[in-house]
Image (cartoon, helix red, strand yellow):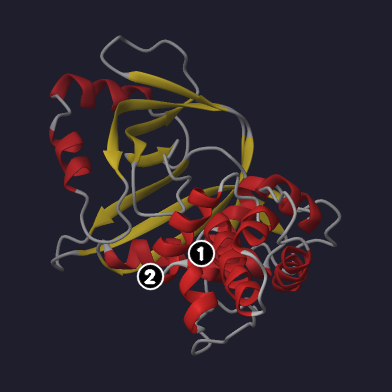
Amino acid sequence: MLGKLNKVIDYIEDHLADDLSSEMISEYAGVSDYHFRKIFSYIAGLTLSDYIKNRRLSQANQDLLHGERVTDVALKYGYESLDGFTRAFKRWSGFLPSDVMKTGMSKSFPRLSFVLTIKGGVAMEFRIEHKPAFNLVGVSRRVPMQFEGVNQAIVKLAQSITDEQREEMHSLQDMEPREIVNASWDADAGFMREEGHLTHLIGVLTTRDRVSGALEKVPVAAHTWAVFPNEGPFPATLQNTMARVYSEWLPSSDYQVINAPTFSFTKMDEHKSDYAYSEIWVPVARVSGSAGSSAENS
């Protein structure tokens, strides 16, 4: 995946003045748009669209330094009006395009280069499981996207569960993992940025279809799941593991994330404060044409 990312960077550089879309770029990379945008964001630290915007404005700055007219530069990088380009350039650089031409003021955003960094040789345990279709059944709510710390909106959702709802969930629970799970999907920012909202469900996995009106039922198709056990201070260990899945495991694996709910469960340690065992279940598919994973358990 790192090799593909660097080839994509070359591709972007060659087409900065063209009509670039994330779908075109992911097709060039040979992976799904959903998977590529997610991997890029976690590794690069910014979204693919933001990277392209920054590189275009950086190149626009260079073109202005070389004496090109502001109007020509604006059209070259896809801006429909001079005013639109001027506003975007001012927000990005802090000064006007005309200032570049008059005073030589300049700002740059260098192209990315991806390299593999080994961080202390920390092993990452995972297993691959194949599950038939099932239903997620529980209570759900749109909650704010939050990457770190305890999400108070999810805490309030958990507190809203009635004894009757909890009893029904336990009666429906008939497949692994036989735990109360937290499932997330449909994020406003595609899980790329800590903004907007996502749908969060607290519930169970079941093969049954008959559910009372007190609970929501979300069908999930048969998929392959990469499962990541983790243990340590909660919620930091769970959140750090999720970040490592996208920044370390996926780029070096033969799998890509598919567009389905990701879920996890947590079992708090009775003898240690804020300490827990958790598992993260990520829906994946083997990358087309791969030779096969070197190991499906580690």
Callout 2: helix, strand or loop?
A: loop
Along the horizontal axis of the image, is 205 left or right of 33?
Answer: left
Determine crowd level at label 1: few under 14, some 14-19, many 20+ residues with C-alpha closer than 10 A. some
- Residue 197: % across, % down: 33, 40
Residue 126 in sight: no
- Residue 68: % across, % down: 67, 70
> Amino acid under label 1?
Tyr
Q: Nearer the viewer, mark 2 or mark 1?
A: 2
231, above or below 18, in the image: below
Determine crowd level at label 2: few under 14, some 14-19, many 20+ residues with C-alpha closer than 10 A. few
90, above or below 199, in the image: below
Give the residue at mark 2.
Answer: 94
Callout 1: helix, strand or loop?
A: helix
Task: Tell me the quarter of the image containing the N terminus.
Answer: bottom right
Earlier residue among tags 2 and 1: 1
Give the residue at mark 1.
Answer: 42
> Amino acid under label 2?
Gly
Residue 289 in sight: yes
Give the residue drawn at x 68%, y 59%.
Answer: 72
- Residue 174: % across, % down: 44, 29
71, above or below 55, in the image: above
Give the residue drawn at x 49%, y 69%.
Answer: 98
Q: Nearer the viewer, residue 114 or 17?
A: 17
Locate residue 142: give its quadrant: top left
Q: Nearer the viewer, residue 244 or 37?
A: 37
Cα separation, mark 2 vs mark 1, equals: 27 Å
Q: Nearer the viewer, residue 44 or 164?
A: 44
Q: Residue furthest front?
A: 102
Total of numbered circles in the picture?
2
Give the residue drawn at x 22%, y 27%.
Answer: 166
